[in-house]
Image (tube, coloured by chain):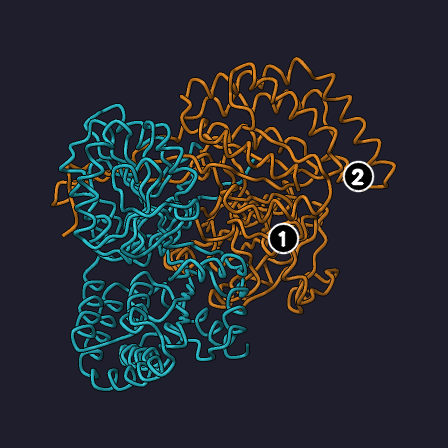
Chain colours: A cyan, B orange
Amino acid sequence: MDEVLNLAKKAKEASKKLAQLSTEQKNRALLKIAQYLEENMEKILTENQKDLAEAKKGGLSPAFIERLTLNEKRILDMAEGVRQVAKLPDPVGEVLGMTRRPNGLVIGQVRVPLGVVGIIYESRPNVTVDAAALCLKAGNAVILRGGKEAFNSNLALVTLMEEALRSEEIPEGAVGMIKTTSRDAANYLMRLNGYLDVLIPRGGAGLIKTVVENSTVPVIETGVGNCHVYVEEDADLEMAERIIINAKCQRPAVCNAMETLLVHEKIAPVFLPQIGKALKENGVEIRGCEVTRRYIPDALPATEEDYYTEFLDLILAVRVVRDLDEAIAHITKYGSGHSEAIVTRDYFKARRFTEEVDAAAVYVNASTRFTDGFEFGFGAEIGISTQKLHARGPMGLKELTTTKYVIYGTGQIRG
Amino acid sequence: MDEVLNLAKKAKEASKKLAQLSTEQKNRALLKIAQYLEENMEKILTENQKDLAEAKKGGLSPAFIERLTLNEKRILDMAEGVRQVAKLPDPVGEVLGMTRRPNGLVIGQVRVPLGVVGIIYESRPNVTVDAAALCLKAGNAVILRGGKEAFNSNLALVTLMEEALRSEEIPEGAVGMIKTTSRDAANYLMRLNGYLDVLIPRGGAGLIKTVVENSTVPVIETGVGNCHVYVEEDADLEMAERIIINAKCQRPAVCNAMETLLVHEKIAPVFLPQIGKALKENGVEIRGCEVTRRYIPDALPATEEDYYTEFLDLILAVRVVRDLDEAIAHITKYGSGHSEAIVTRDYFKARRFTEEVDAAAVYVNASTRFTDGFEFGFGAEIGISTQKLHARGPMGLKELTTTKYVIYGTGQIRG
């Protein structure tokens, strides 16, 4: 607790100075971080090996170990990512609007850093560097709490970043890492109102739920994506197939991958055999409704639970629906408000879908896989918000800021 | 619990339809509410009398009873407030930006309603109508949970609003009121993730703290204002006096009133006797630091606690500081991030104050009393946010919305 409180105090102290840094100072520090990462590759890999050895000994899954693994290419990518952040425009100081009131007060709204950002994440060491770089660029101090399985890797990365920042005279405490791996430390962090301005959990549904339920600090929920593609009766079926295969198979383990396919009943007899074949060729297990199984006979039966599930795997639920209304109702009931797509030629159906589906990103005739800060042109991403407050959808640098009103008077008093 | 869950389900159902209503439909409903309020004044006043009788029997304070009291003028004001909301531009549907990506995807960001908004408040019946009108205009369903002392007044108001909405075919559940007055009902509401998109507490520090600590639904903190005015050595002292008297005395019980005065030590010998006299003439009790008491001999000694206190009364803490640095440090330590003002002629000091003071509203040469949705030109106000996520400072209709990305493709898939 003392450790976390101390970190938070230092971060808060640092955040005041960070908010005043020039863009040049922040960029110099970011470039120094990139340089140190490249120059100290050996050190990082050695520490990562310790984590990997533990993980293998502990029998963790190949997918887990894959996410935990660093190699030269991944470290170079991390460094390159930091350089990209240095190139992005500084969000701090942007004036969002300025008005002159009838009484002569000039009221401006200015973008300023959030202050202190907490990130709770799992065992992907690249998040450590990503998150620190984005927070620094937006003028925030950051407190990192990564998964214990990546402890040695994270410590090596944070130590290097601290050295880089020190050499550029960035205030101590700008990047902090919680070194106690107990749950108590994380729980304590979640209740540090007054020190922490926001907490962003990055990881699976379980982690996010824990943070939402235990945190008194404001939280931005990220990531859970139970995404749908709905194929209308008038769809271009070749386009539909292309989009479905991309949305399901290009990278099935990410939040913007499709989890359920909805098909209009009129085209089910034609389209389901076609898409069933294509999906199987791509190694996808199909779990279908009764009608689906009529046209894709070897599909497993879909359960109610399947429609709620973010498989993050080559598994797809398929359901035949009566019409657009039923498709929207299905998405409203089972969806997580992440990314939803319709494939249609019909203008009015497209319009209804975009207006009535309540999600961070609603697509017409495109793959759900585009919901991503880079694909949206933000140049970076700290996560994808599936809640409605503050930020919704991909979050870039702007979403790591807040605003303040600055009011210039000449002695005005209220009447 | 069943009652609250049912309300929430109805509200969620209603919110889908509310999001699709045209501006005209919403405005017609608002005007009908205003009309019903005026036509049913007697009924409202009769119910309010019941609450007032209970409150007097229960020995509640005159200030409390004042806030609880309705009369003809107040009901007319409420109705007029609703008509004003009808006149405001509809925030829903505004396109905040639209870009065409290199791959041909057209990505737009559109303003949409939040969905279901919960308001937990104390015993001011006007909040019932205010909040409902603002939520409706922004396309949200609202669940109201007012103080039990205003139960009969609130029930009368909500019943009238429901009738007005029904006559305009607004979906049932658009305005809901929790009729169980137990704390359990409020606590249950605070954990209704999946139904409630945001919870806004309106009231004193105790209420807000309870909601922040117990809620798993995202909360927007409002209202606590420990506001400062700092008088620099070079200030126009007449202007400073005018601002101080206004910020402290014009309406001491509100969150944007000044609670602590900071004075540069160089002008203390001249300014403190002057301002001490003016404050006393306005009935203000002064609690000063040691130096202050040298120049205002009958001031009480200020305690550490006083500097943290939002008096909401004709009480003022006064402290002499060495310089701008010490003033900013004081505000950083004791302030609540609401509204802070400097009185100065110096350009560079003004600039430093606006940049280094971390608050929702930072003033140069004006009274803190202007932090208000109406004074800022928003035409309405649902509260003043003192947190940094989603909204900071006065919140109008825009702050009751979120956005979604709408993406128009021609078959794009991710490479």
Which residue is nearer to you in this view: A402 or A178? Answer: A178
Q: Chain of mark 1?
A: B
What label does residue B62 carry, if any? 2
What label does residue B275 carry, if any? 1
Three-letter amino acid code of the residue under disc 2 = Pro
Which residue is nearer to you in this view: A380 or B412? Answer: B412
**Which mark is nearer the camera, 1 or 2?**
2
x and y percent of residue B202 in the render? 61, 43
Three-letter amino acid code of the residue under disc 1 = Ile
Q: Which quarter of the rendered picture does the N terminus of chain A lie within?
A: bottom right
x and y percent of residue B262 in the render? 57, 60
**Figure quadrant of residue B186:** top right
x and y percent of residue B131 in the render? 56, 33
Q: Chain of mark 2?
A: B
Instruction: Indicate whether A145 appears above or below A403.
Output: below
Q: Is residue A405 visible?
A: no
- The residue under the point 33% across, 43% down is A288
Which residue is nearer to you in this view: B72 or A401? Answer: A401
